[in-house]
Image (cartoon, grey):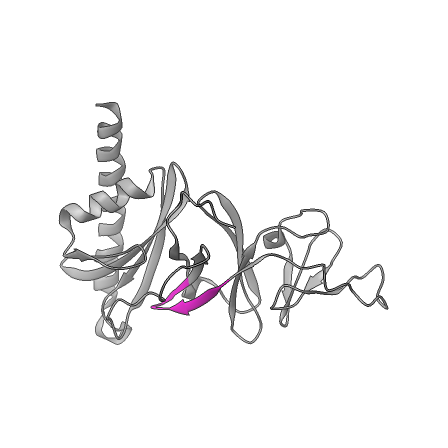
Amino acid sequence: MSDPGQPQGWYAVALAADLDPGTSAGTRLFGAELVVWRDAAGSAHVWEDRCPHRGMRLSFGFVRGDHIACLYHGWQYDAAGQCRYIPAHPDLAVSPMIRARTYASLERLGLVWAAWGEEPGPPPDAGADSLTPLRSLYLDRPAARVRTAFADASKGGLASGLLRTTLAEIPVLVAVQPLADDRCAAHFLIDRPSDALTRSDRARVASACMAWRRSVEARSGERAAS
């Protein structure tokens, strides 16, 4: 269950292009530890980053086909979170009660999204046909301050933490992920198809992203000190 004081909705937790088949990565959302993993068939999953056996982070484990296995004792969980195999007891019929906690998730707009809360609402839609993933940046600032910084120069906010702005004269979408009370991630996508971008375009926007982060952290620091 999510904290009732936190806003429900869909939150981006990774750039889809950064998650290869058969890999996993740890992240956070409102302080909760999550594992984002992609099975061998290409489907992405978002779970609590904890093996129900001894609490080891599943993001430290490994993906085998449509299972993710804990690094500690090798317990394997299927795509629905059900434990299917315990190496120390290979012939055991595993109890259906042994399950990892899963979150509803989907892949859209070049991002992996996780549903937060019992009624997250409709999936995200930016009205964009073709986006090019760029990069994710991590900031030592609260998500609310980052959104405010974008609002100063944004052409308009979108649902589910998405913001639309322009960097280096190129339209960009940004998904803000609240990691914890004082930290967040910003996932950047260029609002153009990949074949319409030159290497120079990508470099200019990437450089502008870094400049934007420095500006936001400096401005937020000034506000916090005032």
In the picture provided, is 135 more to the left or to the right than 150? right
Q: Is residue 124 magenta?
A: no
The x, y position of residue 221, in whole percent, is 26, 30
The x, y position of residue 175, in whole percent, is 32, 56
Q: Is residue 106 magenta?
A: yes
Q: What stretch of residues is rendered in magenta?
A: 104-112
The quarter of the displayed image where residue 131 is located: bottom left
Q: How many marks?
A: 0
Residue at (48% x, 49% y) in the render: 2
Residue 64 visible, this angle: yes
In the picture provided, is 134 more to the left or to the right than 152? right
Residue at (66% x, 52% y) in the render: 51
Magenta part mainly helix, strand or loop?
Answer: strand
Quarter of the rendering occupied by the C terminus: top left
Residue 165 visible, this angle: no
Residue at (24% x, 59% y) in the render: 158
In the picture provided, is 124 more to the left or to the right than 76? left
**Foreground: 101 or 128?**
101
Q: Residue furthest top?
A: 226
The x, y position of residue 97, in whole percent, is 72, 60
In the picture provided, is 4 more to the left or to the right than 207? right
**Foreground: 190 or 44?**
44
The x, y position of residue 125, in whole percent, is 29, 68
Q: 11 above or below 213?
A: below
The quarter of the displayed image where residue 130 is located: bottom left
